[in-house]
Amino acid sequence: MISPPMPTHLLPTRTISPPSNGCAATASPSSPLIAAWPRRFPSGLHSVAGRGKFSLAAITLDDYLPMRSTEVKNRTSTGDITSLRLITAVKTPYLPDGRFDLEAYDSLINMQIEGGAEGVIVGGTTGEGHLMSWDEHIMLIGHTVNCFGTRIKVIGNTGSNSTREAVHATEQGFAVGMHAALHINPYYGKTSTDGMISHFEAVLPMGPTIIYNVPSRTAQDIPPEVIMAISGYPTNMAGVKECVGHERVKHYTDKGIAVWSGNDDECHDSRWQYGATGVISVASNLVPGLMHSLMYEGENATLNGKLLPLMKWLFCQPNPIALNTALAQLGVARPVFRLPYVPLPLEKRIEFVRIVEAIGRENFVGQKEVRILDDDDIVLISRY
């Protein structure tokens, strides 16, 4: 059955005009009208008249203004981000009902600051951003900025395999005060090289940005030609979190592009032998002070060797399974796991206790004695 036409007096008559004060347009980009606008428009697009008095004004490329604030964008420069040597991909702790445990989270952030971390990735893979609603995600970014933004750089993972979602989340992230964004290439529904460039170009105008290349998760490498193409945005292109290895790191550093190693077990050599700026680290959740030394105090094969068993253990199963287990064993976070993550098996929990003893409990976060997590202690959450 075909529905009768809506009476013309009930049809929307919304009009959007470019603001005269230079600020971003006040209309939300999530609205049906704006969400339908492409980034580039075909030439010769004219007014389209609808039934009755409803019409859509002619749209030109200059009519669309991204929802960004010049004040927020200019508060943190790209140079402020490229100066960071130790950035922690921070864990998100949970309450027994699956909501965020903000008290434990705040304590962990404070321990990162005290240990020498200069930045945190909020809601990244390690922080389980993919298990959050966007409301939760942006709230956690805003909370981190509100509580810690004057003491540590807050880098929000607002990437997505949907360009529309990435744009919207990044607008929101910068609106709540994050200092920089982390962006991954589209995964699962992979795109072409030109598609990757267009995807990143859609978010780069909003503020300082780190591009994240982790083919083991996306099943698609970001090739150097993509990074070279978008490095023409010097105002906002901060650099690359690179997980491919030393040679790729050197390829970029030779061209003056800032690179953070995305592999804890390679970060020492990447930093001191291949020119990496620093590391975006999982291990620093546990030993921020030692990771700070590894990035700042010159080549130190002894310290690196001491930490390698911990780094290998952290990735014995897909991250963040081991980290979640470790923080629970240290008493820093409750043993609450949002599925599909479950803790490491008992033998690996015992191995972690031995690793802590070898490195020294005083070098790890928290004040409680490390313990072997019992199966009865673990809470698995499927609805949250």
Image (cartoon, helix red, strand yellow):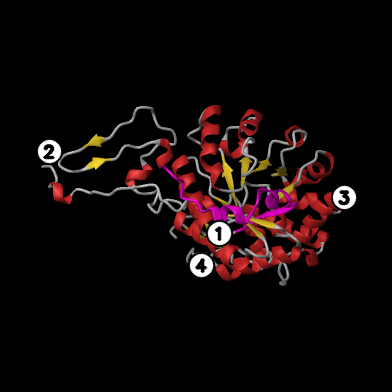
Q: Amino acid at mark 2?
A: Ile
Give the Cα distance between marks 2 and 3.
73 Å
What residue would you read off at disc 4? Answer: 96
Q: Is residue 51 left or right of residue 187?
A: left
Give the Cα distance between marks 2 and 1.
48 Å
**Residue 111, relative to residue 242: is it above or below?**
below
Q: Which mark is residue 240?
A: none
Question: Does the magenta-highlighted stretch encompass residue 88?
Answer: yes
What residue would you read off at disc 2? Answer: 2
Give the Cα distance between marks 3 and 1.
33 Å
Dot 1 or dot 4: first in sequence order is 4
Crowding near the residue tagged with mark 2, few <14, some 14–19, many ≥20 C-alpha atoms within 10 Å: few
Element assignment for label 1: loop
Q: Which mark is residue 298?
A: 3
Q: In front: mark 2 or mark 1?
A: 1
Give the Cα distance between marks 2 and 4.
50 Å
Give the Cα distance between marks 1 and 4.
29 Å
Q: In front: mark 3 or mark 1?
A: 1
Q: Which mark is residue 177?
A: 1
Task: Please count the marks in the image.
Answer: 4
Mark 4 and 3 residues: CB-CB less than 8 Å, in contact? no
Q: Position of residue 274 (x, y in %)?
A: 81, 38
Q: Is residue 101 left or right of residue 330?
A: left
Mark 1 and 4 residues: CB-CB less than 8 Å, in contact? no
Q: Amino acid at mark 3?
A: Gly
Crowding near the residue tagged with mark 4, few <14, some 14–19, many ≥20 C-alpha atoms within 10 Å: some
In depth, the one of 18 and 104 nearer the eye is 18
Hey, which residue is sitting farthest front in the picture? 20
